[in-house]
Image (tube, rainbow, N blue to C red):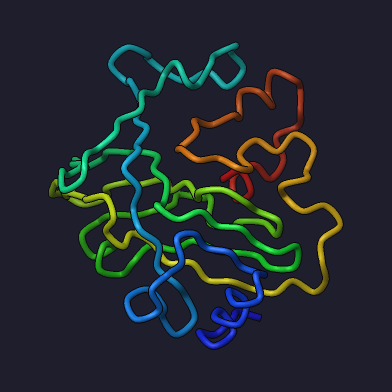
Amino acid sequence: MILSDRDIKKALASGRIKITPKPDYKTQLGSCSIDLHLGSHFRVFKHSTHPFIDLRGNIDTDSIMKEIVVKKDEPFIMQPGDFALATTVENLELADDILGKIEGRSSLGRLGIIVHGTASIFDPGWVGKPTMELGNLGVMPVALYPDMRICAFTFEEVTSRVEVPYRKKKGNKYAGQTSPLASKLTREVSKGIKMKGIGAKDY
């Protein structure tokens, strides 16, 4: 069941959903979602120095990406076809019986800007700054600014409290993140872990 605006406020008041800094309901709360703001840290591929990504290779994904910090009131320009990882300003924490879903804003989507490729689900027990997979599918460059409303979160109640919340999951790769971390997929492949269902849960 998707939480309504009324139930989102109840969940925030009780601590089942924690968003820091505290959201402004007048500007951020929708009928069944809440908007979060774009942070100032971005991670982009150094595609001119690496010809491809070999998931079976012993590659440190941090080495093929670089972090860019954008100052206040300065734009992060997304050219057509660009891809970047970014985090929200807000820190999000979910109870063990609440699931979060990230979605793009319609106004940005109409310009070609998407905020997630496959990673829309945030498991119960998630904690940290949500990472977005920003992409420009349009034909015009778009300037994004830190602190602008960038995405919307909806929340659903699962049928019962999960046995293993994400923050306690063995080998979880992104719990507690404060910056846009590079993909840790090569770590799984190098350990011989079967690549089943990878995507939606690997924020």
What is the quadrant of residue 36 in the picture? Answer: bottom left
Q: In the rendering, at what x and y percent does residue 154 appear?
A: 52, 71
Of the pair 146 and 162, the residue shown nearer to us: 146
Q: Quadrant of the C terminus?
A: top right
Of the pair 192 and 132, the residue shown nearer to us: 132
Of the pair 36 and 159, the residue shown nearer to us: 36
Q: Is residue 189 left or right of residue 112?
A: right
Give the vertical position of 99 relative to 42 (above or below).
Answer: below
In this rendering, the count of numbered labels is 0
Q: In the rendering, at what x and y percent does residue 173 appear?
A: 65, 35
Q: Is residue 166 left or right of residue 101?
A: right
Please give the name of the residue rendered at 61% of the width and 58% of the height, measured from the top-left corner.
93
Q: In the rendering, at what x and y percent does residue 11 appear?
A: 62, 76
Please give the name of the residue rendered at 26% of the width and 50% of the height, measured from the top-left corner.
146
Please give the name of the residue rendered at 45% of the width and 49% of the height, measured from the top-left corner.
117
Please give the name of the residue rendered at 16% of the width and 48% of the height, measured from the top-left corner.
73
Name, please, the residue furthest toward the bottom: 6
What is the quadrant of residue 107 in the picture? Answer: bottom left
Give the vertical position of 63 relative to 198 (above or below).
Answer: above
Give the vertical position of 76 relative to 27 (above or below).
Answer: above
Give the vertical position of 93 relative to 199 (above or below).
Answer: below
Q: In the rendering, at what x and y percent does residue 10 appear?
A: 60, 82
Q: Quadrant of the N terminus?
A: bottom right
Name, please, the residue furthest toward the right: 163
